[in-house]
Amino acid sequence: MKKSKPDTDYYKLQIEDGVLHLNVLMPLIYSNSEYFRSVLSEIGKIKDISKIEIDFSLQDNFDTYLIIFSQSVEKYCIEQNIRFEIINSNPDINSVVILLKSPPAEILEPKPKKSYLYRHFEEIGYIVIKIVKDTYNFISFFGELFIRFLTLIFKPSRLRWEDMPLHFTQSGVMALPITLVIVFLLGMITGYQGALQLKQFGADMFIADLVGISLTRELSPLMVAILVAGRSGSAFAAELGTMKVSEEIDALTTMGFDKFEFLVLPRVMSVTLAMPFLVIICNIVGILGGLIAATSTLDITFSGYIGRMQMALSLWDIGSGLIKSIVFGFLISALGCYKGLNVQGGADAVGRYTTSSVVAGVFLIILADALFTFIFQALGV
């Protein structure tokens, strides 16, 4: 049986077989809220209700008051053990209703605070894992680079030879002024310090041995490598890192360019070839610096210094330094390219990886120099 209840301009109540139909005629917005406040009191006057259906077919314009109204009716139904349903609602209303019926977000309990000692060892563990992972990745990169170098022996045309003069100039010629000044001063310092000690024993002539052997075997290759690591190694890391962040390397790969042949090999080859030339010139300048120190502090002539230098120095002294310089150049350039290609993040990451390339480069240089020392000593050369 169908019964109608008093109508208003804003809603209409109609009951049929225990089902109360609530037809909402006007927009459920906050400015109309005072006209819907009597709905629950009107519903409370009706007996034998088993279900309430709200008809939203005319609700094209609504705000958050629709949510408040629906929740108040649904709450009344729950209290009175009455079924509740929304009918003829549009997709916008359905999405709001679904959102309201979704379970509340789970509140995560705070994790127990770790002790300082625990956090300290945990941080050490993360650092060790990072070092092991970086070492593994660098060895993999180094292996691939070595294979590419072997491939160049049989297919030299794969190298971009037109890029070689540019990188050789930037890494070698442009580095010459600072390396010459540093090694010249290093030769003078070595000469002055050695002269003070040798003069006490009347061994003035051995100043040439001290300066010549120390410079050609150790000081000159080591100092040039450290300076080149600060210049070229950091430059490679910054250049390739910026390209990685701006997705230029991805674009080159998409266009069919091999990043090793296009970006890495020319840089590594240029620094590897430039290092021996830098060391040869720096050897000469460093020996001249030692000559100035020797002639100004000791009773030794120019010809005597040069003659003693020729007697003291052997081809192996010079050659061992050149071998070191080639290896140092390869390590510096390879590490700089590796750091640049592995930049992750934004501009700040480029700075971090650039700094890391210099620090790791200097460490690798000193480590390689120590290994060379042990090997040469074991070979008796």
Image: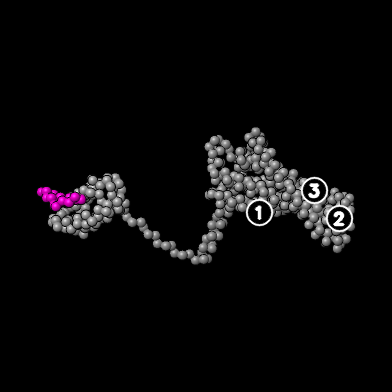
Q: Is residue 266 magenta?
A: no
In the rendered view, tell whether residue 110 sits above or below residue 271: below
Task: State the image quarter where residue 269 is shown.
Answer: top right
Sequence-wise first label, 2 or 1: 2
**Image disc number at residue 255:** none
- For numbered disc 1, what is the local secondary structure? helix
Sequence-wise first label, 3 or 2: 3
> What is the x, y in percent for residue 23?
19, 49
Within-10-Å neighbours for mark 3: few <14, some 14–19, many 20+: some
Q: Which residue is mark 2?
A: 295
Separation of residues labelled 2 and 1 (CA atoms):
36 Å
> What is the x, y in percent for residue 72?
24, 57
Q: Amino acid at mark 1?
A: Phe
Q: Which residue is mark 1?
A: 363
> What is the x, y in percent for residue 275?
71, 45
> What is the x, y in percent for residue 233?
65, 48
In depth, the one of 142 and 20 nearer the eye is 20
Which portion, as a residue range, is magenta?
1-19
Q: Amino acid at mark 3?
A: Ile
Q: Which residue is mark 3?
A: 284
Residue in view at x 56 percent, y 52 percent: 348
In the rendered view, tell whether residue 251 sits above or below residue 304: above
Look at the numbered discs 1 and 3 and tell me whether their residues touch, using CB distance below 8 Å.
Answer: no
Separation of residues labelled 3 and 2 (CA atoms):
16 Å
Side of 339 where 213 appears, left or right: right
Residue in view at x 21 percent, y 48 percent: 25
Task: State the image quarter where residue 248 is shown.
Answer: top right
Separation of residues labelled 1 and 3 (CA atoms):
26 Å
Residue 257 in view here: yes
Q: Amino acid at mark 2?
A: Thr
